[in-house]
Image (cartoon, rainbow, N blue to C red):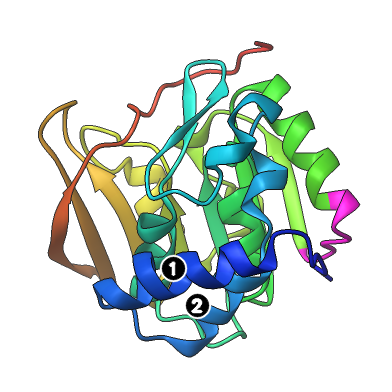
């Protein structure tokens, strides 16, 4: 459940001018973006900018992606509501909340404990019940729950780790930024048996994906 009427007009304006106007057409994605209160997932100091079309700092050297990118990546997953999604990089929990409205279950991995606990608090306050959170090194995915029909990365590895790709179900789709800082491309990988088809979607700028687990 996500019910929040605070700043609803700002969300509607955001979807109309930043997301739909730039080509996102999936009605379920647009509806999810209208429902999730982005201002709940950013620091109070950034709250006035919560519905602007740019990333915002969330602490620990991480950011919350701009709304358009969140919506675009969700659309590229082609979710119909029956999928189990693996998300690498919970971050603020905003993208997690959007995915919770689009998929059956979301399994989200975060390496920074402070971010994970804050995201957990907000998601619980919004009564989001189909999300499972885990503090772990995202490079290993969540093997015990694999395979996943869809996988999404919110930080950029130089190459997609084999451990993550191998957790994708046959016919499944993975959307992720790939490359070094300043030269990243958002890609979609579709698994077809032992083969993986890769599409380049657009140039992006994400924080680098890092290994290990951190408290701060």
Where in the figure is residue 133, as x and y percent of width and height?
73, 45
The quarter of the picture where the C terminus appears is top right
When the figure is inspected, residue 209 is found, relative to residue 212, above or below; the finding is: below
The quarter of the picture where the N terminus appears is bottom right
Q: Does the magenta stretch include residue 175?
A: no
When the figure is inspected, residue 162 is found, relative to residue 19, above or below; the finding is: above
- Residue in the picture at 52% in, 40% down: 49
- Mark 2, residue position: 29
Q: Are marks 1 and 2 in contact (CB under 8 Å)?
A: yes
Q: Which disc number belongs to residue 74?
A: 1
Give the structural element (helix, strand or loop) at label 2.
helix
Q: Which of 4 and 128 is in front in this view?
A: 4
Q: Is residue 128 magenta?
A: yes
Quadrant in which residue 199 is drawn:
bottom left
Where in the figure is residue 118, as x and y percent of width and height?
76, 32
C-alpha gap between disc 1 and disc 2: 7 Å
Q: In this view, does 114 lie to the left or right of 42?
A: right
- Residue in the picture at 58% in, 49% down: 143
Boundaries of the magenta span:
124-130
């Amino acid at each position: 459940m996500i019910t929040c009427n605070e700043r609803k007009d700002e969300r509607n304006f955001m979807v109309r001018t930043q997301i739909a106007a730039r080509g996102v057409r999936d009605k379920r994605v647009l509806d999810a973006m209208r429902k999730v209160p982005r201002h709940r997932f950013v620091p109070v100091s950034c709250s006035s900018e919560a519905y602007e079309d740019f990333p915002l700092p969330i602490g620990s050297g991480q950011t919350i992606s701009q709304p358009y990118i969140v919506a675009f990546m969700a659309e590229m997953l082609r979710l119909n509501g029956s999928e189990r999604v693996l998300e690498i990089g919970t971050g603020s929990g905003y993208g997690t909340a959007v995915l919770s409205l689009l998929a059956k279950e979301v399994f989200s991995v975060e390496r920074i404990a402070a971010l994970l606990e804050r995201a957990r608090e907000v998601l619980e306050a919004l009564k989001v019940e189909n999300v499972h959170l885990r503090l772990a090194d995202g490079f290993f995915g969540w093997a015990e729950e694999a395979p996943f029909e869809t996988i999404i990365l919110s930080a950029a590895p130089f190459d997609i780790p084999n451990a993550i790709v191998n957790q994708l179900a046959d016919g499944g789709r993975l959307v992720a930024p790939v490359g070094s800082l300043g030269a990243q491309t958002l890609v979609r990988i579709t698994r077809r048996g032992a083969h993986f088809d890769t599409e380049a979607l657009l140039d992006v700028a994400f924080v680098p994906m890092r290994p290990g687990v951190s408290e701060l």
